[in-house]
Amino acid sequence: MGFKLISLLLLLSLLILTILSGANHYQALASVKKPHVNHRNRTVLTAAGGGGKAALKVKKQTTGCNLFQGKWVFDASKPFYDSSTCPFIDGEFDCLKFGRPDKQFLKYSWQPDACTIPRFDGEAFLKKWRGKRVMFVGDSLSLNMWESLGCMIHASVPDTKITFLKRTPLSSLTFQEYGVTLYLYRTPYLVDISKESVGRVLNLGAIEDGADAWKDMDLLVFNSWHWWVHKGAQSQGWDFIRNGSSLIRDMDRLDAFNKGLTTWAQWVDQNVNTSQTRVFFQGISPTHYVGKEWNEPRKTCDGQMVPLSGSTYPGGSLPAASVVSHVLSSMKTFVYLLDITTLSQLRKDAHPSSYGGDGGLDCSHWCLPGLPDTWNQLLYAAISM
Ligand SMILES: *[C@@H]1O[C@H](CO)[C@@H](O)[C@H](O)[C@H]1NC(C)=O
Ligand SMILES: *[C@@H]1O[C@H](CO)[C@@H](O)[C@H](O)[C@H]1NC(C)=O
Ligand SMILES: *[C@@H]1O[C@H](CO)[C@@H](O)[C@H](O)[C@H]1NC(C)=O
């Protein structure tokens, strides 16, 4: 009788506290059920309740908001880190080191129309993802984003022990005290290139090479496109395409991408268990070699110092982005599309241009610090939701 009364009182006070603190369903769940949470779903509850009010606020701000619709605004607090103190930046992205004189490109924040992106907190990321494995899979745009995330986290915990291994195809960056590893698996087409008697064959129907390395991750971020438009045996890295049963010299590259990405989608549907792994697709990253897209016909990204204003790109959308949306929508696995195409199209100022250290003009990758930091901020927002 007495025990029951005390329990009832406890429950009642908990209820009142919950109401008073304005908490929602998630916080109540977190405080009542915490002892029964197992390892597998700890992240979910920590994200919703353990982070307290801040996490709840993030949830409210981002729910129902299109993070990818918005504009660039000047932000004096940027950048997230100083390139000279980040040990992971490749020369090709280290624009300041190679003499880029203008710095304003570092000082923009992406502002969605309907909400505010949560502040990136590298230490919170490490705590929330303690013991977990994150992998970026794809081409050098994956490298760009992987190094950016490494730098952003490192800037929050500059003294923590790290292990950094840069290899082909698998690189890794481990934050030892947290047991968090960020992997990079380099495979520009996602599908296989196999050595056959005729030469190197891009096999649109097969993913075997390395795909075992993608298993057992907690977070996967895929990307592919840029290599599909490379022409010439040297630059494209293959001699023939295998399309079903036929071996051909070449084909429409958008069709080939569609076919290869469909093979990837089947691989994900067959191999990824979404109760263990969250899957993202890093949307198509645009290039800025053709100034007529933004009404400066004789220009490229070279010498561009400011983003385009507004929310739309004069040059329109990219056919490859439609292929991605189409393939993702046909999957049974939920893959979150980091829809960074338009927001990146607006950043004609954010490429290495002639400051990539090799003397060429690069309007394809992005300086670090720079745009990929925003991609990671959006990734962070998406996993906080
Ligand atoms: C967490 O896992 C436990 C045990 O597997 C389960 O009973 C509970 O419903 C899960 N909670 C959530 C929020 O997924
Ligand atoms: C590729 O294969 C498909 C059938 O799977 C066929 O419809 C298409 O025409 C082929 N493309 C080329 C360029 O051979
Ligand atoms: C997916 O993972 C969950 C949690 O580990 C497990 O219970 C479930 O059996 C797995 N599903 C498949 C199809 O392997």
Image (cartoon, rainbow, N blue to C red):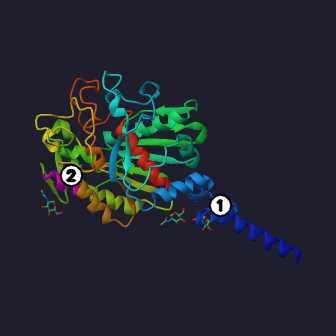
Residue 189 in picture, x, y percent from top left = 27, 47
Disc 1 element: loop
Q: Which three-letter amino acid code belongs to the residue tagged 2?
A: Leu
Q: Which three-letter amino acid code belongs to the residue tagged 1?
A: Ser
The dot on residue 21 is 1
Looking at the image, which residue is at 56% across and 45% down?
A: 124
Q: Name the foreground residue: 273 vs 280.
A: 280
Range of residues picked out in magenta: 251-259
Indicate the quadrant containing the N terminus: top left, top right, bottom left or bottom right: bottom right
Residue 43 in magenta?
no
Residue 15 visible in the displayed image: yes
Q: Which residue is mark 2?
A: 318
Q: Name the foreground residue: 8 vs 198.
A: 8
Image quarter for ligand 2 equals: bottom left
Q: Earlier in the sequence, mark 2 or mark 1?
A: 1
Q: Is residue 277 left or right of residue 335?
A: right
Disc 2 element: loop
Spatial CA span between label 2 and label 1: 47 Å
Identify the main secondary structure in magenta.
Answer: helix
Quadrant of the rendered structure where residue 332 is?
bottom left
